[in-house]
Image (cartoon, rainbow, N blue to C red):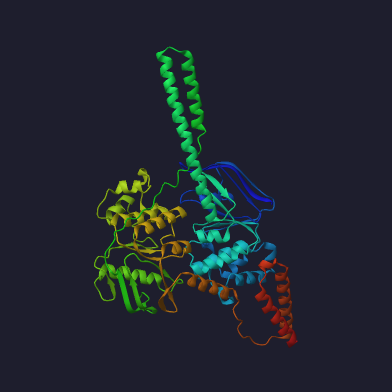
């Protein structure tokens, strides 16, 4: 298999913080690689080095002569905002193709689930999911040999996530993608690279299996390190004893033997098995238990959209959450999940004894909002805890959570998304709530943070209401599932019903929209259209089978026959 890109002994730092030291990485043709690492480990920096935007401090990068590399960033380039969807994709065609390959743009946009009306939409007016589809299309249309994806799953709803899973699994191009979504990594990658301890650990396995192997590697390293340290302690004790005897008995032979032992100890110290230091940051929760038959209840209510002109979103016949329930609130973007969460918090703070939403008198909610708006950007981490918590040694709590002492006075505004998330969870922990309401709690935290959060929740027996697009997190945490669909809220036996619904919706979206009725064509126009159809059919049939669109081919063939009949 041909090598597309190879890094050898890369060294790089950000200011005084080392990111890589003697890092080696190879990407081959048709590799499907997941790049995993804790927040701040340097994943995005590594992508910038691989695509040439950033030069490493040291080391070598070799690229094959036929390497054509594209990068899909986390956010759309703002210079595209005023262009139409069609123009934004068309400009990515090679210069020699731009004059005659408009049909290629049309086919790609249809493959991405867009209809012809949307071709004229400005990029700024597209939804987040649509912008992600455009970025993917811009990367793929030039037929690159390698694509780098920087957290393509961030902030995507499940429907768009499933869409990207299907696209990536059918892609005949090498790619390396950064993601904290374990289910997505398992679905679309065949190799996992862990960026940790300023180096990489590579396994030719999807994430879940690779993670098991990495843990086995860590356990073996720990065991070997204990054996080595025991040997070093024994040798050091023996050397000390011989040195004392040599001095007491004035025995040069014993003194020489002691010095040789000390040199051996030095060599063993230098050759000790490396053991990972981990991410440093810790995520913990501490919740109280409550004795009651309910925590929250809503009966017979129509939930309305916010704003001056509210519209009905969905109807609740009965929603009942008991102590210890772990409830996942499911539904597509825009159906009202966030509205319900904010309504619960508003009523809890202003009318907890009201008849609309009934709370248990012992109910004490810890709220994590997905936008982290509760954190004042102008306050430091220590001040944030002082503002929002009742008691505690806040600096000690921050240090215990893994924040360096020198960073405690940092303003919230300069923290990374992962650091803000961990600060928010520390704030919740210090307040000891008995009911957690978590809006997309995994958006900003790395895989280790997610696993910490899962363990903490399961061990705490907390009452929880969560919204999340992270399927693995939902599957592990929730024991009840409620779905907002078709303007009503209903309970499901398991979340697979919702996932299957989304998979069906994705399949429907891939089917091109039905053409609108047009006026009869003139003979010259019919002939032009026949040539276009023949060209599109030939082009599509010449592609590899996994990239062909049989439904489009049938549509074009049917139109071709109808036009020939008209002639």
Nearer-the-camera pick, 465 or 176: 465
Q: Where does the image place residue 298, in percent across and percent down from the top left?
A: 32, 75
Q: Is residue 305 above or below residue 199?
A: below
Q: Is residue 99 above or below residue 376?
A: below
Q: Residue at x 51, y 26 (%)?
A: 264
Task: Give the mark count.
Answer: 0
Q: Where does the image place residue 102, in percent across and percent down from the top left?
A: 66, 70
Q: Residue at x 71, y 77 (%)?
A: 533
Q: Residue at x 64, y 87 (%)?
A: 519
Report whether residue 44 is seen.
no
Q: Residue furthest top?
A: 250
Q: Residue at x 41, y 58 (%)?
A: 454
Q: Is residue 155 above or below residue 353?
A: above
Nearer-the-camera pick, 496 or 359: 496
Q: Where does the image place residue 203, in percent across and percent down from the top left?
A: 57, 50
Nearer-the-camera pick, 413 or 223: 223
Report whether residue 268 is seen.
yes
Nearer-the-camera pick, 482 or 517: 482
Q: Is residue 260 above or below residue 471?
A: above
Which quadrant of the rendered structure holds the C terminus? Answer: bottom right
Q: Where does the image place residue 477, in percent across and percent down from the top left?
A: 41, 62
Residue 7 quadrant: top right
Q: Is residue 434 left or right of residue 207?
A: left
């Amino acid at each position: 298999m041909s090598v597309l890109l190879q890094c050898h002994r890369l060294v790089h730092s950000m200011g005084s913080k080392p990111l890589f030291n003697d890092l080696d990485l190879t990407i081959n043709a048709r590799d499907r690689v997941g790049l995993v690492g804790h927040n701040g480990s340097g994943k995005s920096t590594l992508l910038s080095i691989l695509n040439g935007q950033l030069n490493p401090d040291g080391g070598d990068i070799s690229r094959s002569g036929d390497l054509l590399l594209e990068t899909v960033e986390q956010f759309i380039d703002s210079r595209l905002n005023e262009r139409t969807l069609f123009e934004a994709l068309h400009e990515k065609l090679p210069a020699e193709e731009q004059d005659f390959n408009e049909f290629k743009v049309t086919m790609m946009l249809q493959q991405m689930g867009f209809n012809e009306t949307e071709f004229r939409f400005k990029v700024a007016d597209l939804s987040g999911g649509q912008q992600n589809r455009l970025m993917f299309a811009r990367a793929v249309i030039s037929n690159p040999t390698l694509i780098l994806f920087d957290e393509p799953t961030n902030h995507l709803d499940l429907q768009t996530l499933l869409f990207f899973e299907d696209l990536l699994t059918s892609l005949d191009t090498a790619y390396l993608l950064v993601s904290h979504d374990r289910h997505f990594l398992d679905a679309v990658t065949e190799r996992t690279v862990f960026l940790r301890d300023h180096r990489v650990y590579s396994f030719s396995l999807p994430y879940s299996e690779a993670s098991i192997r990495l843990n086995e590697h860590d356990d073996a390293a720990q065991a070997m390190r204990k054996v080595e340290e025991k040997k070093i302690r024994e040798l050091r004790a023996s050397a000390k004893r011989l040195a004392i005897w040599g001095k007491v008995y004035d025995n040069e032979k014993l003194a020489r033997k002691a010095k040789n032992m000390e040199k051996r100890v030095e060599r063993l110290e230098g050759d000790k098995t490396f053991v990972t230091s981990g991410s440093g940051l810790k995520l913990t929760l501490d919740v109280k238990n409550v004795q009651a038959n309910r925590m929250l209840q809503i009966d017979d209510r129509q939930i309305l959209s916010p704003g001056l002109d509210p519209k009905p979103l969905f109807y609740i016949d009965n929603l009942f959450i008991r102590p210890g329930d772990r409830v996942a609130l499911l539904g597509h973007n825009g159906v009202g999940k966030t509205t319900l969460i904010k309504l619960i918090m508003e009523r809890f703070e202003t009318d907890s004894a009201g008849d609309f939403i009934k709370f248990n008198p012992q109910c004490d909610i810890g709220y994590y909002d997905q936008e982290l708006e509760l954190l004042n950007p102008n306050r430091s981490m220590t001040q944030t805890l002082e503002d929002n918590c009742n008691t505690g040694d806040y600096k000690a709590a921050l240090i215990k959570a893994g924040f360096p002492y020198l960073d405690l006075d940092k303003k919230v505004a300069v923290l990374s998304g992962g650091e803000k998330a961990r600060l928010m969870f520390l704030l919740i922990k210090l307040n000891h709530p008995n009911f957690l309401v978590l809006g997309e709690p995994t958006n900003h935290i790395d895989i280790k943070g997610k696993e910490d959060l899962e363990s903490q929740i399961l061990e705490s027996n907390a009452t929880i209401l969560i919204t999340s697009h992270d399927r693995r997190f939902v599957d592990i945490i929730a024991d009840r599932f409620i779905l907002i669909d078709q303007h009503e809220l209903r309970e499901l036996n398991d979340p697979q019903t919702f996932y299957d619904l989304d998979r069906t919706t994705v399949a429907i979206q891939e089917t091109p929209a039905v053409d609108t009725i047009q006026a009869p064509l003139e003979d010259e126009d019919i002939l032009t259209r026949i040539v276009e159809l023949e060209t599109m059919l030939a082009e599509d049939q010449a592609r590899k089978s996994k990239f062909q669109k049989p439904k489009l081919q049938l549509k074009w063939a049917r139109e071709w026959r109808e036009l020939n009949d008209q002639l």
